[in-house]
Image: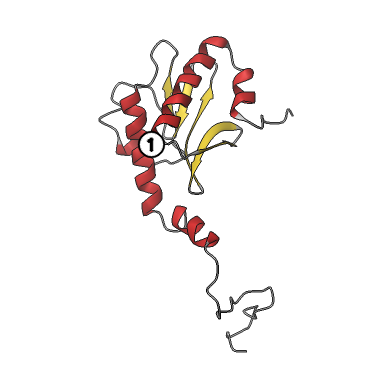
C-alpha cells in the first residue's frame, strides 16, 4: 500500500491538473480565512488544523473534488447554504468548473470553528495541555504522583 503524502504540496503533485487547480484555489481561500491554521495531512488527505483541531480538508475524487469539514454536523448546520449541491453527511462535492465560492468556504470554516469551541476536550483541551504547571502544585498521575489503580489520591 502506498504511503500517504507528507505535505499538501506532495498530495497536489499527484492530482490531475484540472482538479489540482481547483484544490489549490480552495487552499488559498482557506489560508486567507484562517491564516494561523497549520497545514497537515489527516486521514491521508490535505487538511487544516487550528488550535489542535482539524477544521477542514479536501480531496480529489474520480469525478471532481470534495471538501471535508471533519464533522458530521457542519454540513447539516448549513443546509440552506448548501441547497442544490452534491454532498454526503461528511463531504461537500464540487467540480473544477463549479468551485466552492469564497463566501461559502468562509461559512463552512466558521461553522466548524463554532463546533470546536463548543465541544468539550478539543481546542480548549489542547491549549490547557500546553499551559505550564503552577509552581508548588504537584500533578497526580501514574508517573510518580500516585493516582494509580486503587489510589484514593492520598500521599
State the image coordinates of residue 22 (x, y, percent, origin top left): 47, 16
Q: Residue furthest left?
A: 80
Q: Which residue is drawn at the image coordinates 34% and 39% (left, top)? A: 110
Q: Residues within 10 Å of mark 1 (few under 14, many from 20)?
A: some
Q: How many marks?
A: 1
Label 1 sits on a secondary structure element that is helix
Position of the N terminus by quadrant: top right
Q: Which residue is drawn at the image coordinates 52% and 10% (left, top)? A: 18
State the image coordinates of residue 93 (x, y, percent, origin top left): 43, 23
Q: Residue furthest right?
A: 1
State the image coordinates of residue 67 (x, y, percent, origin top left): 45, 28
Residue on which the image places disc 1: 109
Is 122 rendered above or below residue 14?
Answer: below
- Taking depth in this image into account, of 25 and 153 the one nearest to the observer is 25
State the image coordinates of residue 7 (x, y, percent, origin top left): 63, 30
Q: Which residue is drawn at the image coordinates 40% and 26% (left, top)? A: 87
Q: Quadrant of residue 95?
A: top left
Position of the C terminus by quadrant: bottom right
Q: What is the basis of the colouring in this image?
A: secondary structure
Q: Is residue 19 visible?
A: yes
Q: Which residue is drawn at the image coordinates 60% and 77% (left, top)? A: 140
Q: Is residue 63 visible?
A: no
Is 62 rendered above or below residue 82?
Answer: above
Q: Residue furthest front?
A: 135
Amino acid at each position: 500500500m502506498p504511503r500517504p503524502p507528507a505535505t499538501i504540496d506532495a498530495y497536489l503533485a499527484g492530482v490531475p491538473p484540472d482538479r489540482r487547480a481547483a484544490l489549490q484555489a480552495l487552499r488559498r481561500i482557506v489560508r486567507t480565512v484562517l491564516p494561523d491554521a497549520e497545514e497537515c495531512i489527516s486521514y491521508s488527505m490535505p487538511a487544516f488544523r487550528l488550535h489542535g483541531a482539524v477544521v477542514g480538508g479536501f480531496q480529489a475524487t474520480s469525478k471532481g473534488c470534495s471538501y471535508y469539514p471533519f464533522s458530521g454536523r457542519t454540513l447539516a448546520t448549513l443546509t440552506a447554504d448548501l441547497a442544490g449541491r452534491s454532498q454526503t453527511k461528511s463531504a461537500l462535492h464540487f467540480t473544477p468548473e463549479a468551485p466552492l465560492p469564497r463566501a461559502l468556504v468562509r461559512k463552512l470554516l466558521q461553522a466548524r470553528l463554532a463546533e470546536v469551541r463548543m465541544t468539550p476536550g478539543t481546542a480548549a483541551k489542547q491549549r490547557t495541555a500546553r499551559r505550564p504547571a503552577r509552581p508548588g502544585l504537584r500533578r497526580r498521575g501514574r508517573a510518580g504522583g500516585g493516582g494509580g489503580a486503587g489510589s484514593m489520591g492520598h500521599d
